[in-house]
Image (tube, rainbow, N blue to C red):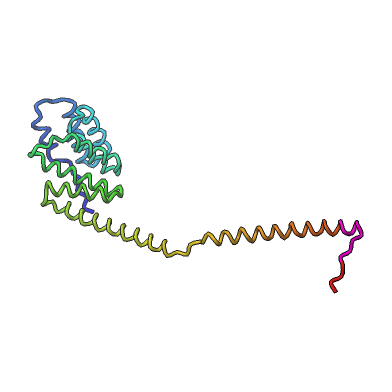
Amino acid sequence: MRDKCLICFLILLSVVFVGWIGGWTRALKAGNEAYTSGDYHAAQIAFREAALQKPDSSLAHYNLGTALYRNKQFNEAIEAFRDSLAKHNGDTEATLRLAHIYYNLGNAEFKRGDLRRAIDAYKHALRLNPDDTDAQHNLALALQLAQQQEDLARQQRANKDTEPQTEPSDIGEAEAAQLLELLKKNENTRRQKLLQQQRKSGYRRSKDW
């Protein structure tokens, strides 16, 4: 899988063009610097603060997702990317950033092992950016692995169907054998009691010949 989990290039522009200097901008800048230096834990903290400062910012949630992904916190990264998608305004100018969100969401789903959701995310990314060769590569890989999983599951089901099954009659025979043994013991006990009674009464069985 090609791992292209990058901070959206708009984060650098946001620091330059945002018309005010506030907590949100400082948090984004701090997160960007930490991420660039490879300190993904510090980046995660900074981007989480940016998301708190501006909950409706798709960018803050997206960057938080990238830091969480780098920390191998894939479940949390997926949640952040989905929050970013939910808060995305859908502007045509932001189409490329939206493709990045779907692409990285696909990577996180892939890492978590949910190939079907990864495939869906990669397809969304390619609809927005058909020229993304990394998304094309990862989609092909996810499709191939998903097919292999289906083939393996189908083979396992076939093997299970051909395994000799224990018939209900086998269990019945076992129970019947136990019951027969119990009856024999009861019969022997009954005969012994009857013989004792016969001896006490002086009764003797007539000869067969």
Residue 7 figure quarter: top left
Query: Please, is residue 187 above or below residue 126 in the view?
Result: below
The magenta stretch spans residue 30: no
Describe residue 138's horizontal placement relative to residue 129 as left or right. right
| Residue 169 relative to residue 198: left or right | left
Residue 209 at what x, y percent from top left?
A: 85, 74
The quadrant where residue 19 appears: top left
Q: Is residue 64 left or right of residue 164?
A: left
Q: Nearer the viewer, residue 106 or 202?
A: 202
The image shows residue 70, relative to residue 162, as above or below, that is above
Residue name at image x 21 percent, y 27 percent: 53
The one of 85 and 45 positioned closer to us in this rendering = 85
Quarter of the image containing the N terminus? bottom left
Residue 33 seen in the current view = no
Residue 200 part of the magenta segment: yes
Residue 68: image x %, image y %?
A: 27, 40
The magenta stretch spans which residues? Answer: 197-205
Among the 4 quarters of the image, the one containing residue 89: top left
Count of numbered marks: 0
Task: Residue 60: give x, y in percent of width and height.
Answer: 19, 34
Which residue is more in the foreground, 124 or 5? 124
- Residue farthest to the right, as pictured: 202
- The residue under the point 22% across, 50% down is 119
Give how far across and how far down residue 195 sits, in percent. Answer: 84, 59
The residue closer to the viewer here, 152 or 57, is 152
Q: Is residue 31 above or below residue 110?
A: above
On the question of residue 143 being in view, the answer is yes
